[in-house]
Amino acid sequence: MRTVRLICTWALLGFFVGCQAYSDGSKRTVGEFADDAQIKAAVKFRLLNDPEVKGLQVGVSVAKGVVTLKGRVPSDYARKKALRIAGETGSVASVEDRLTIVE
């Protein structure tokens, strides 16, 4: 039993340490990584629930609180609304617009 607990502890420690290094050379703590995942889920959920934005065609990525929206929206109104929705989501530092209007 003690051996299993020790193995699990080392596995978790290895997982958390491995999550901090990224290919671009930047480092994020486990808390920052979790915050970004939570922000991404919240923004995506809000975009999916908005009938004008049609969130299925909008990709959301988050790095250190900066939300990037990429994809297609049906109008300029939908683009502005998607940016506003993302910006109003808690803990968002800024929003980067990479949306394309497709009518």
Image (tube, rainbow, N blue to C red):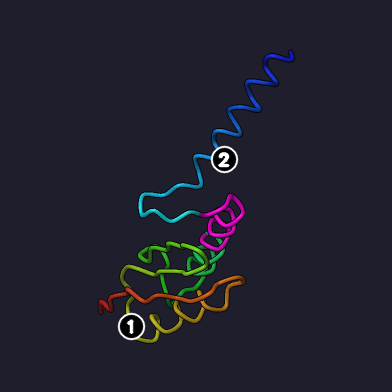
Residue 7 screen position, x and y as percent = 63, 20
Task: Say which element carries label 1.
Answer: loop
Q: Is residue 24 above or below residue 60?
A: above
Residue drawn at point x = 42 percent, y = 63 percent: 60
Amino acid type, label 1:
Ser
Is 90 situated left or right of 75 in this image? Answer: right
Q: Which one is in front, 20 or 41?
A: 20
> Which stretch is magenta?
28-40
Instruction: Based on the picture, tell me whether residue 37 belongs to the magenta stretch.
Output: yes
The residue under label 1 is 75
Relative vertical location of residue 99 with respect to residue 30 in this rendering, above or below: below
Residue that label 2 marks: 16
Front-lying residue, 35 or 22: 22
Q: Quadrant of the C terminus?
A: bottom left
Looking at the rendered image, the disc whose residue lies closer to the viewer, 1 or 2, is 2
Q: Nearer the viewer, residue 38 or 78?
A: 38
- First in sequence: mark 1 or mark 2? 2
Spot occupied by residue 99 in the image (x, y as percentages of width and height): 32, 74
38 vs 69: above or below: above
Numbered-mark total: 2
Residue 45: assigned label: none
The percent position of residue 54, horizontal first and vertical second, equals 41, 70
Q: Quadrant of residue 76?
A: bottom left
Q: Are the two marked residues, 1 and 2, in contact with CB atoms closer than 8 angstroms? A: no
Nearer-the-camera pick, 24 or 66:
24
Residue density around tag 2, few if under 14, some if 14–19, many if 20 or more, within 10 Å: few
Based on the displayed image, in which of its 4 quarters is residue 8 positioned?
top right
Q: Is residue 50 magenta?
A: no
